[in-house]
Amino acid sequence: MEPFVWQEERNGCGLFFIKGWMEKDSGITAGFTSRHGGISGQPFGSLNCGLHVQDIPGHVIGNRELLAHALHTQLRDCTYAEQVHGKEVEVVTEAHVGAGIYSRESAIQAKDAFVTNKMGIFIHALFADCVPLFFYDPAHRAVGLAHAGWRGTVLQIARETIETMRRQFGSRPEQLLAAIGPSIQGCCYEVDEKVISKVREVLNELGADRSSNSANGGGSVYTDIGNGKFKLSLQHLNRQIMIKAGIMQAHIEISSLCTSCRTDLFFSHRKEGGRTGRMAAWIGLYE
């Protein structure tokens, strides 16, 4: 069953919520925006949440405000970051509240993963094909969010996020819930030997094969399609990394929604030639 469930909010925002988590705990919100329900014009139509794509800044801020209101919070309680495809994790505190909402200069700098146990802070990260990774510790009331393109994935940003939650909040990996969100899937993500060589290194380190148990949500990490080209599933590679880091297979949910296949719903940097908007993933704990 698809873990990210579509809902159109009263203010028009089209959002995908991790309904299973939210039904179990009304004190958490987590999900992913679509491209619908905002005020940006083309080619950023319409719910573009990225300030770095040459959209009109006032439109982007207006879209972020619409999102905040749809989540029943205030924009001033949100955080945004300047992501760099790395593996650095920021522990988000009250000092970060409001970071990046109006300008890139004020954002959390050079980070791609974020964790917090503070209520009333809503973490955001931006995507247009890369993989959003969500983490929730119901035992210690802590959450995490990571941005995993191929570089962040092979740097094992998922493991870094889990380890930071363990160190900062006492989180036990076997108690964590994880969700892998809408992103470009193996059906559409073609890469070369340079990328696959890094993927093989990770699989060797994990002691894992490129295939995993499909009965438990697994699948092929990559497929050789000839001429030095491969179809890569960053979703299944991140799943393998999470399992090796101690998260139980049954606690990992994976979206089947492909941002490249579904440009009717999502922005896709690759499918749309780089001239497009950005979705926001979010996670937060209500006070």
Image (spheres, rainbow, N blue to C red):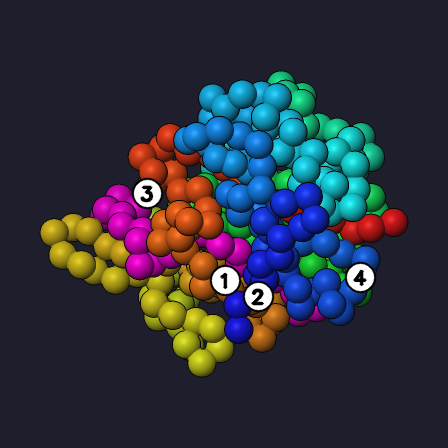
Q: What residue type is labelled 3?
A: Lys
Q: Distance between the residues labelled 2 and 4?
A: 16 Å
Rate crowding at label 2 as few (under 14), some (14 to 19) or many (20 or more) other CA atoms within 10 Å. many
The answer to whether 55 appears left or right of 24 in the picture is: left
Tag in front: 1 or 3: 3
- Residue at the spot 38% in from the left edge and 70% down from the top edge: 219
- Residue at the spot 53% in from the left edge and 58% down from the top edge: 180
Instruction: Kindly check if marks 1 and 3 are in contact, taking CB atoms under 8 A apart as contact.
Output: no
- Disc sitting over residue 39 in the figure: none
Q: What residue type is labelled 4?
A: Ser
Q: Is residue 244 visible?
A: no
Rate crowding at label 3 as few (under 14), some (14 to 19) or many (20 or more) other CA atoms within 10 Å. some
Q: Which of marks 1 and 3 is nearer the N terminus?
A: 1
Q: How far apart are marks 2 and 3 (CA)?
A: 24 Å
Q: What stretch is highlighted in magenta?
A: 174-195
- Disc sitting over residue 271 in the figure: 3
Look at mark 1 in the image and give the residue it sits on: 255
* 207 up-or-down from 183: above or below: below
Q: Earlier in the sequence, mark 4 or mark 3?
A: 4
Measured as percent of width and height from the top left, residue 173 is found at: 66, 64
Q: Which amino acid does label 2 sit on?
A: Pro
Helix, strand or loop at label 4? It is loop
Q: Earlier in the sequence, mark 1 or mark 2?
A: 2
Instruction: Kindly check if marks 1 and 2 are in contact, taking CB atoms under 8 A apart as contact.
Output: yes
- Disc sitting over residue 3 in the figure: 2
Q: Can residue 270 be seen in this view?
A: yes
Q: Which quadrant holds residue 59?
A: top right
- Disc sitting over residue 26 in the figure: 4
Q: Earlier in the sequence, mark 4 or mark 1?
A: 4
Measured as percent of width and height from the top left, residue 40 is found at: 53, 30
